[in-house]
Image (cartoon, grey):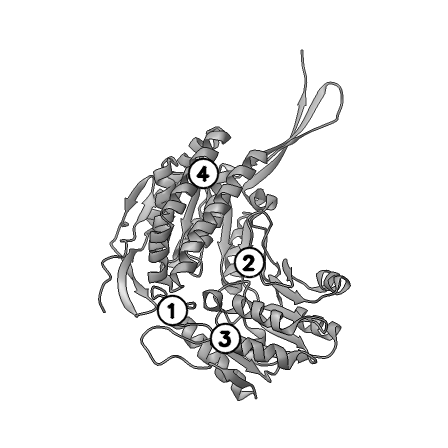
Amino acid sequence: MTTDHAHPTPRMYIAGEWCTGGTGRTAEVVNPATEEVIGHVPLATTADLDRAVDAAVAGFDTWRATPVAERTAILHRAADLLVARSAEVGRTMTREQGKPLAEASGEARRVAGALRWDADDARRAYGRVIPSAPDTLLTVRRQPIGPVAAFTPWNFPAGGPMRKIAGALSAGCSIVIKASEETPGTACELVRCFADAGVPAGVLNLVFGEPAEVSAHLIAHPATRLIAFTGSVPVGKLLASAAGARMKPALMELGGHAPVLVCADADPVTAARRSAAAKFANAGQVCTSPSRFLVHESLVDAFTEEFVRAAGRVVVGDGLDEGVTMGPLANERRLKAMETLTADAVARGAKILTGGGRLDRKGYFFPPTVLTDVPPDAELMTDEPFGPIAPVVPFADLDDALRTANALPYGLAAYGFTRSTATAEHLTRELEAGILSVNHCGGSVHEAPSGGVKSSGYGREGGPEGLDAYLVTKRVSHLLTD
């Protein structure tokens, strides 16, 4: 294995200083397109974590006392720097996560917009005056909750950390964030933008480490006041349980298994094209990725034919190569998961229309895969695939399809295609999901909230609701005296 010398050297950022940790322990960073080791990321000790929390405590005192206009100006400078550096940030992201360069650079620019939204929205975190007795001033105040401990995965190396950092810093909190050890270079470049913009030392602290060790220590630390996590349902449940045992609030953005309902009056070709574009974005490694395609029996042949055609137009390869529209899976774990899910479905009677097996080349490449005749007990229909596999299943009755869509314990995203406003409203009422898109499969937007129901988590990120978890509501009753 060789080292890509163009890749930035990952470091932790604690108390305003870049550092490598106390013991010199590291983990390899691997380029998923080549399987080459491109760097090593330092792993924190408990002493490093304590130092980060201590810095966050001091940073919180500084940041909460900083006028909101000044905080907002600093955060806007960080957003400007991220946009200016988006090409190189994107290149770093592609090397360590695999997504095509255009997607990666676009992600960096997009999350700069999310930071601007949160920063501006914090200026509208209004309280209120409540009519009361003549001698009493009754008010409601919104104040930052305190130091935040946050944990983010590898699938959106800029977007995941930014959602936590933007919410926390905009609200006036400090943060210790453990970003993914598989995509550390992007997290470092993100944090560098904040440091260069003038965020005071201690307000933003970046650590890496053994996930179970870091989460257990930061959640248990008495100084952390909020736990914010994006990741899988099983891990989210463990972290939420640990936080609950200490009466700490938590923000949980967990996985899903998003159904797509193509109703009898929909345009099957348009539905297939839009669904396929969303399915194969980021190689399907998106928590809101459409993953169960329930299509009315009168449209299923036309839908499937166009979906397979769209899958065939996807160009799979190294995300740094010209013309590539889908990169490798991010790691070997995801590759093996795709092989397992496909084999299980086929063993139960499913048919592969395209794709279905690892590409015969170096790297973690798995092609766009479309299956039909997938039985309801196949693992693909019950477990989030988190990859470029699309099962297409016909239905005869919409209410039966809704029951199928709602049968799983997840409720993050759902999608529907229909020409009828009445049917769209029926989908809106009946689908158990925190996010619903009708006649498209669009992603998150800054101005509206995202989050799940049921086992897909709780709390919201984005929109006016995005700062709620980072603020406490305080009632103040002031008896006026002479």
Does any portion of residue 212 appear in the rendered image? Answer: no
* Closer to viewer: mark 2 or mark 1: 2
Residue 479 in percent (x, y) is at 68, 20
Q: Which amino acid does label 4 sit on?
A: His
Give the amino acid at mark 2.
Gly
Tag 3 near tag 2, CB within 8 Å:
no
CA separation in Å, label 1 and label 3: 22 Å
Residue for badge 2 = 443
Sequence-wise first label, 2 or 1: 1
Report the mark closest to the observer, 4 or 1: 4
Identify the disc placed on residue 311: 3
Q: Mark 1 points at which residue?
A: 331
Q: On the rendered structure, is 379 left or right of 361?
A: right
Label 4, on which residue? 76
Q: Is mark 3 on a helix, strand or loop?
A: helix
Check contact, mark 2 vs mark 1: CB within 8 A: no
Say whether residue 475 is left or right of residue 9.
right
- Quarter holding residue 456: bottom right
N-terminal label among 4 and 3: 4
Q: How crowded is mark 2: few (under 14 residues within 10 Å), some or many (20 or more)?
A: few
Q: Label 2: state its secondary structure.
A: loop
> N-terminal of the two: label 1 or label 3?
3
Which label lies toward us, 4 or 3?
A: 3
For the residues labelled 4 and 1, the Cα–Cα distance comes to: 34 Å
Q: Position of residue 184 (x, y in %)?
A: 35, 55
Label 1 SS = loop
Give amino acid for label 1: Asn
In the displayed structure image, the side of residue 47 where residue 337 appears, left or right: right
10 Å crowding of disc 4: few (<14), some (14-19), many (20+): many
Quadrant for the N terminus in the image: bottom left
